[in-house]
Amino acid sequence: MLPFLTDQWGNPSSIYSFGNEVARRLEDARTKVAALINADPSEVVFTSCGTESNNAALNSALMTNPGKRRVITTAVEHSSNIKFCELLRKRDYDVTFLPVEPDGSIDLHLLDKSITRDTGIVSVMYANNETGVIFPIEEVASICRSHGLLCHTDAVQAAGKLKIDVQSLGVSFLSLSAHKFHAPKGIGLLYVNRRARFQPYVVGGRQEKDRRGGTENVPYIIGMGRAAELALESLPEERTRVRSLRDRLEDGILKTIANTSRNGAKEERLPNTTNIAFDGVEAEAILMLLDQLDICASSGSACKSGSLDPSHVLAAMGVPLARSRGSIRFSLGIYNTDADVDYLLEHLPPVIAKLRRASPAKDLKSAPNTSAIRARPGAHKPGPAKPMAV
Ligand code: PLP
C-alpha cells in the first residue's frame, strides 16, 4: 500500500499516464479479489465497506424492479441489513424477517413459502457474525432462481475462512468487507453477477463502470488485493489449525467452567468462531476483566459494543435474556497460537469464578476443577493484542 500513499498518488480516472499506471494496479487488485470468490473481475465493484455493499445490493434490487416492494431476509442479519430493512419499512416497503431455529439455522421450506409475487430480493447472510453459524446459500439461491428472484448474501464473515465460489453459489450479489481478511478497515466490495441489472447506490462520477460514484480509495484497494491473495493461501490453515484451536478453546471452556453452553450449531459453523454463554455473569464484566489480561473478545458484534441491548441474534434463536447477557464471542485467526489458547483457558476460569462470587446468582454450582486453575507464575503472557478477524 505504501507506494500508493507516497509516490504513486495519481488518480486512476485521469487521462495522464501517471494516473494510468495507478489504474492498471487497481485492476490488478480487482483481479486478485475476484479470485477470492471465483468471480470475473468485471463483476467486482469496490465500495467503502460491507455496510455499503449490503445497502447497495438491496437498493439496486428494489430500484431496478419498481413493482416489487418486498424484501425477505433473516432475523439474524448484521445491523447493516436489518437497519436498512427497517428504513425500507418506513418507506412503505414490506420486509419479512425469517425466524431461525434454536441452533441459529434457517428453515428453507419456510423461506420458499414466504416468497410472494411482490418480492424483489432475498438476502440471507453466508455466516453469522455472532455465532459463526453457516447458512446454505447454494440452496437459498436455487430457491430464488426457481422463483426468478434476485438473491444477495452478506459473506462478510465468511471471506478468508471458507472457500467462496460465486459460480457454484449462484447468487446475484455478494458483499465482502476487507478487514475481515486482514486488509485495512474501510474498504469492501460488492459482487454483481454480470446478468443482474444494477443501479448504483452512491451516485456521482462514472467510476466502477457507473456502478459506484466517487474516486477510488486506491491504497486500500491495493491492500485488499494483496490481503485477498494471502487469504486464499491461508484458507487450508483456517480449516485445520484455526479450527482445532477453536475446538480446543471451546471444549476447554465447556469442560472446566460449570454452567456454560455454546450458542449455535456445532458443525455448520465458521472454523474460527465460538459463542459461549456463562450463566450468572454479565458479558461486559467478563470482557473488562479479560481486557486487563490482554485478551480481546466481544459480546455480540463490534458494531454494537457500547450498547447494552441484548443480542438480536441470540434473541431470535430463543436464548433467554439472562443467558444472552452472559454470552461472549471468541474469534480466532491465523495469528493465534496454542499458547494463546492455553493462556485463555488458564485465566478465564478464575475470572468467571470471581464474577460469580460477586454476582447475586450465587446458587450456580462451580465446576469441581474451576478453583484448581490458577495463573501460573511466568505463564504465557501475550504481547500486544494480535490482529484477529472480528
Ligand atoms: N456484515 C457482517 C456479517 C459483519 O460482521 C459486518 C461487520 O462486522 C458487516 C456486515 C459490516 O461491515 P463493515 O463494518 O465493513 O461495514
Image: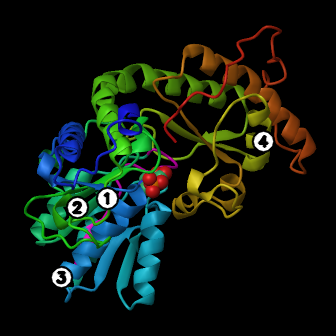
Inspect this view and state whether residue 78 appears.
Answer: yes
- Which type of secondary structure does the marked residue at label 3 adopt? loop
Q: Identify the amino acid type marked 4.
A: Met
Q: Tell me which label, 2 or 4, sits earlier in the chain.
A: 2
**For this rendering, which residue is in front, 58 or 275?**
58
- Which type of secondary structure does the marked residue at label 2 adopt? helix
Q: Quadrant of ligand 1?
A: bottom left
Q: Identify the amino acid type marked 2.
A: Gln
> Horizontal and vertical percent for residue 32?
22, 36
> Horizontal and vertical percent for residue 102?
49, 56
Number of numbered callouts drawn: 4
Q: Tell me which label, 4 or 3, sits earlier in the chain.
A: 3
Residue receiving disc 2 = 207
Residue 326 left/right relative to 150:
right
Q: Residue at x 70, y 25 (%)?
A: 256
What residue span does the magenta drawing correspond to?
120-132
The disc at residue 65 is 3
- C-beta proximity under 8 Å, tags 2 and 1: yes
When the figure is inspected, residue 229 is found, relative to residue 217, above or below; the finding is: above
Residue receiving disc 1 = 215
Residue receiving disc 4 = 288
Magenta portion: prevailing SS class: loop
